[in-house]
Amino acid sequence: MLPHIAVTGMNNLACCKIRTQTGDNTRRPASRWRRGGQIAGWLVPGATLVLLPKCPVCVAAYVALFSGVGISIAAAARLRTSLLVLCLTVLLWLVLKLLGRVVFRTRRSQWRKRNLRRQISRLTS
């Protein structure tokens, strides 16, 4: 059995918080990689939708130009439709994710205000 050693300077902060110079606990700022990933999450499907050609012949030409593989017009039409559905799905998911964050923040702040009012009313009465 291992001996029990008392640890006096244990850090009880969550991994997403840091101790600042003033001593309060704040969330870490988002890293550049994370912010870059969020921007790319919006930029890539949006740019794909903008640059996606309308005719299947052009899609087949782009596939042949960039990959060296020739595909049929029917396969190019399916590929175009698949890319369209995929990009719209990703953009819809990003919008819903953003709306969920906004709604959560709003409800959380409303809950905090209500809770603070209750605590004040308890202290005054």
Image (cartoon, rainbow, N blue to C red):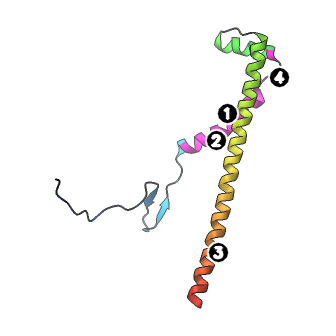
Viewed as shown, does residue 38 lie left or right of 84? left
**Residue interval drawn in magenta:** 34-56
Camera-nearest label, 3 or 2: 3
Q: Disc 3 to disc 2, how far (Cα)?
A: 35 Å
Q: Earlier in the sequence, mark 3 or mark 2?
A: 2
Going from N to C along the chain, the mark reached first, 4 or 2, is 2
Residue 70 pos. (x, y %): 70, 8
Q: CB atoms at circles 3 and 1 under 8 Å apart?
A: no
- As displayed, is residue 15 above or below residue 63? below
Main SS of the magenta part reads helix
Spatial distance from mark 3 to mark 1, Cα to Cα? 41 Å
**Mark 2 — residue?**
39
Q: Which residue is mark 1?
A: 44
Q: Residues within 10 Å of mark 2 (few under 14, many from 20)?
A: few
Among numbered discs 1 and 4, the one appearing first in the sequence: 1
Which residue is label 3 attached to? 114
The residue lying at 59 percent from left, 90 percent from top is: 124
Please name which of the two marks, 3 or 1, marks the residue nearer to the observer. 3
Instruction: Kindly state the secondary structure of the residue where label 3 is placed.
Output: helix
